């Protein structure tokens, strides 16, 4: 490639220079140091002689001047610097690890020895124990050795998988100042529970670790003596009552090995007694519902004994009748939901009323359901079987026509006065909750009276004392004339009877 040199008469301008340095230079074609950089702008004055002909590049149509030698040298040196390979590292060279990346050795025995020594020095003074645990947390790694910490506080020693004591033969590595060595009474175990409460309030990160520890201890119940099981049950119940532990720890009791040997049911009885000593039955049952354990209580017994009657007898004999009644109610609610679902399906298919009556009676007998529980379900299913008109003036006529069809079904299961009152209250609630039915209440009651679903006595009792609070003034006003008519008719019939 032929590179053209500037003409001897070329005048160079360097725009970035100061005015003093911007002077005319006579370019020397032989001196490369005076070649302008590529970024500079070339400005040519009119030469006195014609410039030589430019020889085009062989590869392109354009022509361009050669870069200065200094720039070429700099570019090549930069390229060589970037491509320079790093020196190889000598074999066996050791790198210093950052302190934050160094891993400490897992030494639970050192932690155990320090903790056991402190507990032995504190002795039976639980206040001193709580202060020791509070102050030692800044020196010992509670987060890392949480399992060892709670093992020692509960059992007095580190526990191996399965619940056996690792240091059972060495008394110097165990402590007698723990839950399992405490007196078996509620007040003493409550004092130990306060130690756990203070520790977890001080070191909040131990909360989840303590929950996991209690689940593990419940799985190890077979390895503990009966006395130790009782103390652990009392501790668990007290901590459940204080809210330190969630009710989900009870899922460990559903393990097959504990259930088959009867350990699960026996432990649960002791736990619930301690829990109810701290909280009332409603609080206990509410916690069970939140943890979705209300429907799993029967799993505390083997499969061949998982019945409501066996559960009720076992817990009633143990002095926990409230829990027995709670389970009966929960089972009844589950049965009612299934019955309502099946009834809804049969009514939507427009099954004959006789078939529906037979089915409901069989379910009542099989699940021991009272008539008072069934009448409300029937009303709900009947009203849900229709898509009601949105216009208030048309919905009353539609409701009367629909209810007249199913009045014989309601009459079968409203043979008792209490069932009639429940039906009236259900009608009142429905008409209040659905504003289009507000004016239809009196017509529905009169229809049921004529169809022998409701008796005079039930209507009068509802009017005087058994009505609900929802829409009371509106519905009592609607029923006023009809009730007066019933009272007059009753008086007339009484007077006629006296004359006869």
Image (tube, grey):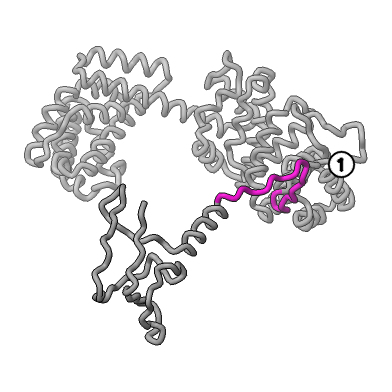
Residue 404, how many percent across, how many down? Answer: 14, 25
**Nearer to me, 431 or 40:** 40
Vertical order, 487 against 132 (above or below): above
| Neighbourhood count class around disc 1 (C-alpha, 10 Å): few under 14, some 14–19, many 20 upward | some
* Residue 444 seen in render: yes
- 91 to the left or right of 208: right
Q: Residue at x 27, y 64 (%)?
A: 52
Secondary structure at badge 1 equals loop
Residue 416 is covered by the magenta coloring = no
Secondary structure mostly seen in magenta is: loop
Magenta highlight range: 83-101
Residue 86 is covered by the magenta coloring = yes
Residue 328, how many percent across, how many down? Answer: 49, 27
Q: Residue at x 50, y 33 (%)?
A: 292
Q: Which residue bears the numbered disc 1?
A: 176
* Residue 499 seen in render: no
Vertical order, 338 against 211 (above or below): above
């Amino acid at each position: 490639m032929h590179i053209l040199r500037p003409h001897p008469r070329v005048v160079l301008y360097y725009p970035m220079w100061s005015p003093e340095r911007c002077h005319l230079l006579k370019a020397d074609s032989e001196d490369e140091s005076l070649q302008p950089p590529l970024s500079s702008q070339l400005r040519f004055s009119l030469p006195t002689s014609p410039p030589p002909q430019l020889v085009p590049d062989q590869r392109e149509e354009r022509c361009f001047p050669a870069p200065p030698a200094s720039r070429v040298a700099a570019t090549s040196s930069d390229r060589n610097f970037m491509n320079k390979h790093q020196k190889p590292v000598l074999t066996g060279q050791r790198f210093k690890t950052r302190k934050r990346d160094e891993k400490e050795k897992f030494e639970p025995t050192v932690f155990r020895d320090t903790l056991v020594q402190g507990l032995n020095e504190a002795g039976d003074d639980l206040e001193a124990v709580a202060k020791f645990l509070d102050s030692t947390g800044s020196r010992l790694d509670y987060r890392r050795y949480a399992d060892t910490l709670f093992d020692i506080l509960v059992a007095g020693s580190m526990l191996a998988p399965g619940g056996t004591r690792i240091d059972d033969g060495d008394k110097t590595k165990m402590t007698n100042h723990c839950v399992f060595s405490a007196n078996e009474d509620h007040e003493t175990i409550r004092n130990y529970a306060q130690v756990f409460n203070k520790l977890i309030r001080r070191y909040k990160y131990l909360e989840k670790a303590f929950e996991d520890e209690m689940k593990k201890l419940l799985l190890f119940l077979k390895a503990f003596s009966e006395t130790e099981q009782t103390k652990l049950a009392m501790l668990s119940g007290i901590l459940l009552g204080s809210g330190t532990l969630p009710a989900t720890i009870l899922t460990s009791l559903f393990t097959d090995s504990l259930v088959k040997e009867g350990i699960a049911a026996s432990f649960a009885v002791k736990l619930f007694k301690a829990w109810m000593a701290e909280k009332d039955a409603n609080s206990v049952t509410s916690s069970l519902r939140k943890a979705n354990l209300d429907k799993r209580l029967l799993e505390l017994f083997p499969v061949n004994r998982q019945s409501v009657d066996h559960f009720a007898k076992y817990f009633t004999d143990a002095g926990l009748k409230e829990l027995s009644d709670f389970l009966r109610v929960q089972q009844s609610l589950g049965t009612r939901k299934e019955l309502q679902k099946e009834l809804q399906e049969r009514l939507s298919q427009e099954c004959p009323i006789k078939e529906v009556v037979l089915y409901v009676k069989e379910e009542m007998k099989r699940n021991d359901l009272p008539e008072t529980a069934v009448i409300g379900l029937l009303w709900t299913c009947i009203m849900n079987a229709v898509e009601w008109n949105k216009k208030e003036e048309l919905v009353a006529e539609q409701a009367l026509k629909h209810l007249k069809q199913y009045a014989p079904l309601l009459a079968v299961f409203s043979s008792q006065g209490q069932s009639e009152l429940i039906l009236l209250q259900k009608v009142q609630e429905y008409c209040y909750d659905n504003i289009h039915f507000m004016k239809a209440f009196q017509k529905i009651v009169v229809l049921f009276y004529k169809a022998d679903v409701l008796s005079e006595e039930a209507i009068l009792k509802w009017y005087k004392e058994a009505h609900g609070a929802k829409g009371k003034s509106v519905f009592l006003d609607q029923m006023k004339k009809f009730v007066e008519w019933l009272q007059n008719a009753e008086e007339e019939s009484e007077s006629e009877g006296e004359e006869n």
